[in-house]
Amino acid sequence: MSANILVVDDDPQILRMLRTTLQASGYAVNTAGGGRSALEAIAQSVPDLLITDLSMPGMDGIELTRKVRASHELPIIVLSVRDNDEAKVQALDEGADDYVTKPFRTPELLARVRAHLRRTQRAETASHAVLEVGHFHIDQDSRIVTVRGEHLHLSPKEFDLLLLFAKSPLKVLTHKTLLRSIWGVAGANQPEYLRVLVAQLRKKIETDTSKYIQSEPWVGYRFSPDGHEDLTTF
């Protein structure tokens, strides 16, 4: 059964282009010309993935993302011509899973769509106690981790960080999200804590050929459980 994707944009040409592209890849596609009509469509039938423009009249992509995320866990990809860190961080902090800047290459967008749909499918079938994702086997009860069949010795915070990444593979997690999740509100303004912890975890899990933690400059980090550096390879 093909995944159902809802595309939201106030530009009819972009809607037609995305509908044609996604349908050619085997997806069922619905479209909406704005945030309010998108919410009405979701109320009728929740899609498997949402792609939304950021700048739209009435209800923009940020508000739409916030409202959808309040009640649904579907992947959300934001599209925007605004290639600046503030817009990216705001969209991701409100619950978007990914941010693609216009103009974008069609293969890259399709790769991200496939990656996020696979992440959702894995999450639906994963055991709550044991997480199997990519090269990683994580037993949450015993806090035992193996990667590529080798046992890892992780500190408590290294384990917490890896678990956060593993639960959201291929999703961009912002610095603020990670800091608050690991150190609480008090750590939200201590980015150096996160830099050090990421560096420590990288030393323990990565090799010359397997790069699992990808930096999104000034925004956050993305976890690739199979060690791919280029999302277009997915």
Image (spheres, rainbow, N blue to C red):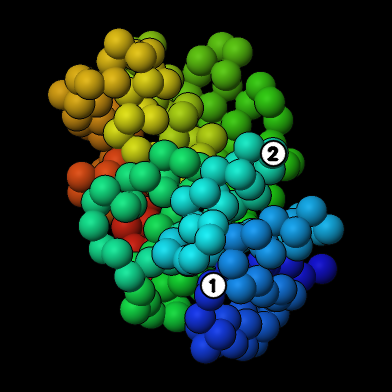
Q: Is residue 115 visible?
A: no
Label 1, on which residue? 9
Q: Residue at x 40, y 58 (%)?
A: 99
Q: What residue sits 21% from the left and 49% below the top?
A: 217
Residue 78: give x, y in percent of width and height: 46, 60
Q: Is residue 137 visible?
A: yes
Residue carrying label 2: 71
Q: Amino acid at mark 2?
A: Ser
* Tag 1: amino acid: Asp
Task: Tell me where residue 29 appears, x and y as whole percent.
Answer: 70, 75
Q: Position of residue 15 (x, y in %)?
A: 57, 81
Dot 2, how many residues are within 10 Å of its Cα: few (below 14), some (14-19), or many (20+)? few
Instruction: Give the CA distance from mark 2 to mark 1.
Output: 21 Å
Q: Earlier in the sequence, mark 2 or mark 1?
A: 1
Reply above or below: 147 against 161. Answer: below
What secondary structure is marked by label 1? loop
Q: Residue at x 71, y 73 (%)?
A: 30
Give the answer, above or below, for where 100 lies relative to 208: below
Secondary element at image label 2: loop
Q: Is residue 204 left or right of residue 61?
A: left
